[in-house]
Amino acid sequence: MADTCGQVLLGSGLTVLSHPLMYIKVLVQVGHEPLPPSLGRNLFGRQVYQLPGLFAYAKHIIKIDGKAGLFNGLAPRLCAGTIGTLVHSRVLQRCQDAGKYEVSGTSQKAEEGSLQHVVNETTKEMIARSCATIVTHPFHVITLRCMVQFIGRETKYSGVFDSIVTVYKNEGVLGFFAGLIPRLLGDVLSLWICNMLAHLINTYAIDDSVSQMDLGFCHFMLTYPFVLVSNLMAVNDCGLAGGLPPYASIYPTWVDCWRHLSLEGNMSRGNSLFFRKLPVGKTYAIDQKRFF
């Protein structure tokens, strides 16, 4: 129990510190570009037009809403983090206890480090993560909508309980789970691929330090498209300006959203908040003009 409380406190602290970063990333993901591009230099010293980065975006938000504006949506995100940690810990403990009972009833036990052991542990972690994700997704949806309403200056989502009532009143129970499927898929796929890759590397190839670095990058690359699609679907056609044209098309399903982003070459939109090169010929909702 003490370990779980420590995890909750640590997670809450990290959530508060990282919240402005996530806030800006979400606004970029939905295509909100309130500032014009500026002429700068890339890593190779060449002059290119760049979209505003993290600090310029943060200054813009502070100018409009003050420093407190950088923490819009923090309350439901803290709720999601706390509940998610508790659910993950409890479900994982149950899975481990169930595994011990099964082992005690048989004469064989998977050797630590073996493929069977990795499969067993990954399965337990998958169940725990999936349960935590499903339980906390309503708070995730509210968090995103609290952030995105900055675009249209709405106040539709003003608090955790009021937001719960708003979502249920307008969309019913299904509204709380908008964007859940791609989020779950991305988490499960990356978990299995990274764990299997780690097993292969640790068993046959490179040392642990190299594998950890590679796996961190692999996890980010695998999950980001799913995270992007999930976030867009969570705010899609929810009555906020950020979930309607010109910022977003109306997507019947998350597959349509994925296909549309792929065709436009926007599957990595928002994955970096520094050195944001301006894509040639892209249309931005700032003033519906094309920048070249």
Image (tube, grey):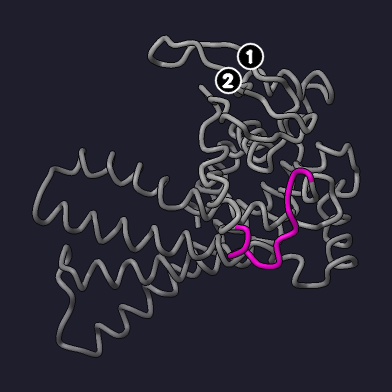
- Does the segment drawn in magenta span residue 234? no
Give me the C-alpha separation between circle 1 and circle 2. 5 Å
Which residue position is annotated with label 2? 50
Q: Is 240 placed left or right of 99 in the picture?
A: right
Amino acid type of the residue that numbered disc 1 sits on in the rendered structure = Ser
The answer to which image quadrant residue 239 occupies is: bottom right
Left or right placement of residue 111 versus residue 154 in this view: left
Above/below status of 124 relative to 154: below
Foreground residue among 104 and 61:
61
Q: In the image, is residue 174 above or below residue 269?
A: below
Q: Do the residues labelled 1 and 2 touch (CB within 8 Å)?
A: yes
The part of the chain drawn in magenta is 246-257
Around disc 1, counting alpha carbons within 10 Å, would you say few (fewer than 14), some (14 to 19), or many (20 or more)? few
Identify which residue, 193 or 115, lies in the foreground. Answer: 193
User: What residue sits 42% from the left and 67% below the top?
Assistant: 126
Q: Residue at x 20, y 58 (%)?
A: 199
Say which residue appears at 49% left-offset and 52% top-offset: 2
* Magenta stretch prevailing secondary structure: loop
Report whether 213 appears left or right of 167: left
- Quarter of the image with the C terminus in it: top right
Q: Which amino acid is tagged 2?
A: Gln
